[in-house]
Amino acid sequence: MATQETPGGPSVGYITNGFPAPGLRRTVRHITGHNDNGKSVFLSADSGDHHKIMGDQQAIANILYSTIETPVDLNDDVDIKHAKENEPPLNYTNGTVVRMVDFGPGVGTPLHRAMSIVYGAVMEGEFELTLDSGETRVLRQGDVSINRAGAHAWRNLTGNGNLPGRMLYVLVGSKDVVVNGEKLGAYLGWLEKYHTGE
């Protein structure tokens, strides 16, 4: 990841080679299920199965969970097996992806669009969200964006661009989006190499 369109960026000397990124605390996911009596139980507690270093070791994505369909089939833990064994693409057309991204200081994304509704929550830090119209908003810890297949870019402003930050994204597949008779398409810029096809 890098500021706007170019890999690299201002976080010179900031290197992440594992989750969590330096300066951020470890996140633990807690997966529940059911015992033989139908009572809810905790099945596991860990930091996720799929981590991906992005850019010039300046960001790391942690896939917390994914599903290939909605409604989700929870029987016989088929969803757990699929999520563990399959690193998802950016999003599933008929499913969901929960992705946490740790950004290095000042690091951003290129302008990109996912064909999904994306709930983006600032977990730690402060981020600038820029739309392809040129509109911008600054989101702070606890703020949430609800991006309805809009082209956008993120930039970490935490500590005036000197500290790492963390975002949580929940991507839910959408139907085709048509504006004035033209179907919008997904594009990822240089992020594409980090996401496989569906």
Image (cartoon, rainbow, N blue to C red):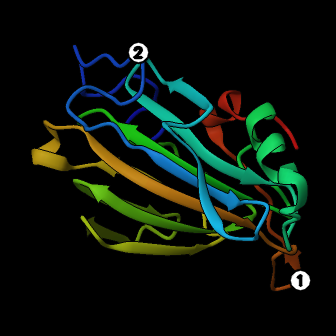
Viewer-closest of 168 and 191: 168
Q: Position of residue 104 (x, y in %)?
A: 30, 32
Q: Which mark is residue 181?
A: 1
Residue at horizontal 48%, vertical 36%? Answer: 47
| Residue 110 screen position, x and y as percent | 51, 43
Q: Nearer the viewer, mark 1 or mark 2?
A: 2
Question: Alpha-carbon distance for marks 1 and 2?
Answer: 45 Å
Q: Is residue 91 above or below residue 179?
A: above
Residue occupying image coordinates x 69% and y 59%: 33
The residue type indicated by label 2 comes to: Asn
The circle drawn on residue 115 is none
Disc 1 marks a residue whose amino acid type is Gly
Q: Secondary structure at mark 2?
A: loop
Residue 34 % position (x, y): 72, 62
Residue 56 in percent (x, y) is at: 43, 17
Q: Around disc 1, counting alpha carbons within 10 Å, would you say few (fewer than 14), some (14 to 19), or many (20 or more)?
A: few
What label sits on residue 17 in the rendered view? 2
Q: If you read the primary sequence from the N terminus, does the residue marked by circle 1 or circle 2 appear first?
A: 2
Q: Secondary structure at mark 1?
A: loop
